[in-house]
Amino acid sequence: MARIDLEDDRTIRTLLHDLFDAAVASADPVKTLGQHVPDPPRGRCIVVGAGKASPAMAAALEAAWPDVSLSGLVVTRDGHSVTTRRIEIVEASHPVPDHRSEQAARRMLSLVTGLTPDDMVIALMSGGGSATLAMPAPGIAFDDKVALHQALLHSGATIGEMNLVRGAVSAIKSGRLARAAFPAKVVTLVISDVPGDRPDMIASGPTVGRPPPRADALAIIRHYGIKIPPTIAAFLGQPDLRVDQVNALDDVRMIASPTLMLQAASGFARQVGIPTLTLGDALEGEAAEMGTVLASISKSVVQHGLPAKAPLIVLSGGEGTVTIRDGRVGRGGRNTEFLLGLALALQGERRVWAIAGDTDGIDGTEDAAGAIVTPDTLVRAYAANLDPRGMLAGHDSYSLFATLGDLVITGPTYTNVNDFRAILIA
């Protein structure tokens, strides 16, 4: 591949899009799942799954499966279905659950109940499964669980903290689906979207781990000042039930992850002759503040050649948070919020461009994966009579980048390895 011209704006925009595409392609289930398929069991094989990538995983499993005795149910976000032959795909709400999420959970529990040691359950789990597979623990009203889920999204809690709380108040998460399948063998195929690639955190681990301590969930809720309904307070105030790890045959296989995504993007950059600096796959914190920090690193490269010299592409993954403190909710997601924070901190640094996006194609609740920042982002925003600082404060970053024509719109990508960020220092 030929080296590119880092003096041309159009060429740089194309490079940024190509980096994002390389990152997403590395997590395509069609390319990665086949090598992780288990041997067929003597008995039945039931497939269950949840998350934005689970339908594509189901289609890839069908293509790789050597026998026709395969059936099951997968639930995904609205608009993320694909065509399958034997595994049923249903849709539910995301990022806040609805009653379709509960119906899917009840059906899955029913599908895996009554299996034998000769049977197998293949669980296809990916990011987004916590919302699309939601069934409250006994004694908790579904609407109360939805209210808690929504409050967590606005609280600033990390994805790990949110999933711990979700698992504590669920009837299907935190290994409960696997325990319902006992004594059948459970094989979980996972596409990671969480820092550290912990399987028990991905979709809140329906087939992995065990219920977290209720006291830990209550401590997180209190830390973020979340008001909870009486049914949830009463449930979390009770002693934990003893839960045995009943299925010693559980098998978890990671088929795609943020680390592999960053490696793929780095390899693409090297092909066009640009060195990379990877900050890791698990960056967390307030999205706008993360933008400020990465702007400081970028300016250090420009001014001092530290921690590396330009030209350079700084890569990172992970998941920022957006805390809604005063009820001001515009249009945006954590990636466009990160980018607007980055642009404001860069103040038009002429040698820095950036792209950030959610690899599932949806940043928050909008139709864009993310956006692009250029050296003249702020100049063009002011020329369009926009107020970048006010829009950041009002969590309206999507509107700014939409006005500038700098959104990255891919549609559903049918995978999810969390956020991808690339900063090009020319």
Image: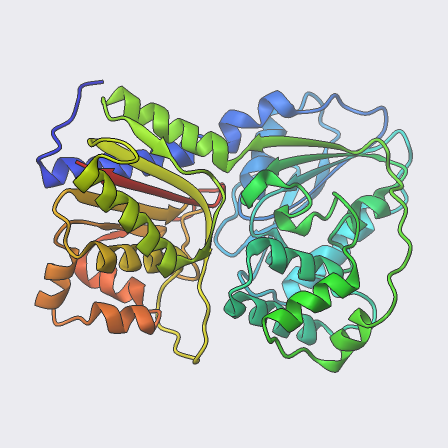
Colour theme: rainbow
For the question of whether residue 28 can be seen, the reply is: no
Residue 159, quarter of the rendered image: bottom right
| Residue in front for this viewpoint, 123 or 422 | 422
Query: Where residue 94 sits: x, y (%)?
Result: 54, 60
Residue 48 placement, left or right of 356:
right
Q: Position of residue 130 (x, y in %)?
A: 63, 55
The number of numbered discs placed on residues in the rendered structure image is 0
Residue visible at 85% across and 48% down?
180
Give the percent coordinates (x, y) of residue 170.
75, 61
Residue located 18% across and 40% down the image: 302
* Identity of the residue drawn at 64% across and 24% down: 36
- In this view, which residue lies farthest toward the front? 304
Q: Quadrant of residue 400?
A: bottom left
Q: Which part of the image, by quadrant, shows the N terminus?
A: top left
Could you tell me which residue is drawn at 82 percent across and 52 percent down? 110
- Which residue occupies the foreground of this view, 49 or 21? 21
Q: Nearer the viewer, residue 160 or 358?
A: 160
**Residue 166 rendering spot, x and y as whole percentages:** 68, 61
Using the rendered image of the protein, determine whether residue 358 is visible from the camera's viewpoint: yes
Does residue 311 sit above or below 354 in this rendering? above
